[in-house]
Image (cartoon, rainbow, N blue to C red):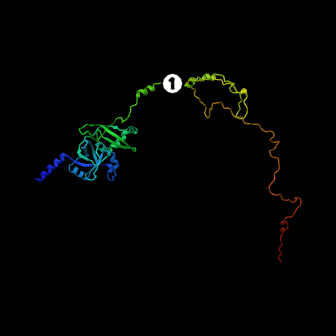
Amino acid sequence: MFSNLGQSFFRAQQASGFEDYFRCYPVSMMPSSSSREVANFGGKIFLPPSTLHKLTMLHISYPMLFELTNQETGRSTHSGVLEFLAEEGRCYLPQWMMSTLGIQTGGLLKIKNCDLPLGSFVKIEPQSVDFLEISDPKAVLENVLRNFTTLTVDDIVEVSYNNKVFGIKVLEVKPESSSHGICVIETDLETDFAPPVGYVEPDYKKEKKQSQVNPAATNPGLVGQGSMAKKINYSELLKEKPNTTKFQGSGVKLSGKTIKNEEVAAQDTSGLSLEGQPAPLILPDNQLFFGYPLKPYKGDNRTDKNTNQNPLFAGQGQTLRKSKKRKDKSTQSTSAKDKTRSPDAIIIDSD
């Protein structure tokens, strides 16, 4: 009889599912944990070890999904569980989740298990224009969703990227359900982005009108070849004869010689034309053009005829040593070797 009562009680508890109340605290107040920083920018919570025992007895299937409800404000959201290591009677939530529920630190929170459909589509809205600075937002969102188990409409989740925190609001999810939430584990999720809050659409019609303005009015150098020369009538200015009264002085070459007046002549520009495309300057190999004809240097090849007649040095040299008196070469002196000259033959007496 008692066994039948126990089985009926267990079936009734299994049919009702898991439901309990906890005092909630932010993840930042949690004792030291290696996953604390990751959990603060995710969608999972921490529950006590006794909760795992109850869920195991109720045969709750994986993934374990929960509905969090603040009965004072009537707000609710969904989450998964990261670890069962919280103190008994407590649960730890990310800061964005506590803001969404509108619950204070140490407030009473109702948690029960639930089932959510696998999501196929989500539309999000960044809460700051700074989100546009991210080069690949879809790749960033894909990496962020690894820390989430569920997504609920009207939730404003927080993600951390490049030492910045961005707020993202969930606008729409598919498939739609009465719980307004989806499960994002082991599913192909299509993502759509709404314009960020505070974003102003540029006026494309005004930009189009500005682009249709004749560029020659503002920049004549953009139309044709030599348009600036046409504007100042440069070809007519070159045809004018130079006014010799402007400069009455005389020129000097780099060598120091003065220039004669006959050498200064007017530039002939009759054949100069600035119309059309300029002709290409094609030079042979190993030749450069500096804007003027090359005049080879004429070296001074004159030979000095008086070089042999007038030697460069005709004096006498002197040494720093004192001169010694030399003996007269005419006097003949016998050397010491002659005095000790050896005999021509040596006779030995045998007797």
Task: Please report the residue visible at 34 percent of the width from the left and 40 percent of the height from the top.
Answer: 168
Above or below, 268 against 11 in this view is: above
Residue appearing at x 42%, y 27% in the figure = 206
Tag 1's secondary structure?
helix
Residue 21: % across, % down: 23, 48
At which x and y percent is residue 2?
Answer: 12, 53
Q: Is residue 92 visible?
A: no
Q: For the C terminus, which image quadrant?
A: bottom right
Question: Which amino acid lies under the numbered mark 1 shown in the image of this protein?
Answer: Ala
Of all residues shown, which one is farthest toward the right?
330
Residue on which the image places disc 1: 217
Q: Position of residue 12 (x, y in %)?
A: 16, 47
Q: Nearer the viewer, residue 139 or 75?
A: 75
User: Badge 1 local density, few (<14 within 10 Å), some, or many (20+)?
Assistant: few
Vertical placement of 274 versus 110: above or below? above
In the rendered image, residue 24, in percent from the top left (x then y), is placed at: 28, 48
| Image quadrant where residue 73 sits | top left
Report the side of 152 relative to 209 (left or right): left
Side of 135 relative to 174 (left or right)? right
Give the quarter of the image for residue 189: top left
Residue 157 appearing in the image: yes
Count numbered badges in the picture. Answer: 1
Please tell me whether residue 143 is drawn above or below residue 85 in the rendered image: above
Q: Nearer the viewer, residue 234 or 332?
A: 234
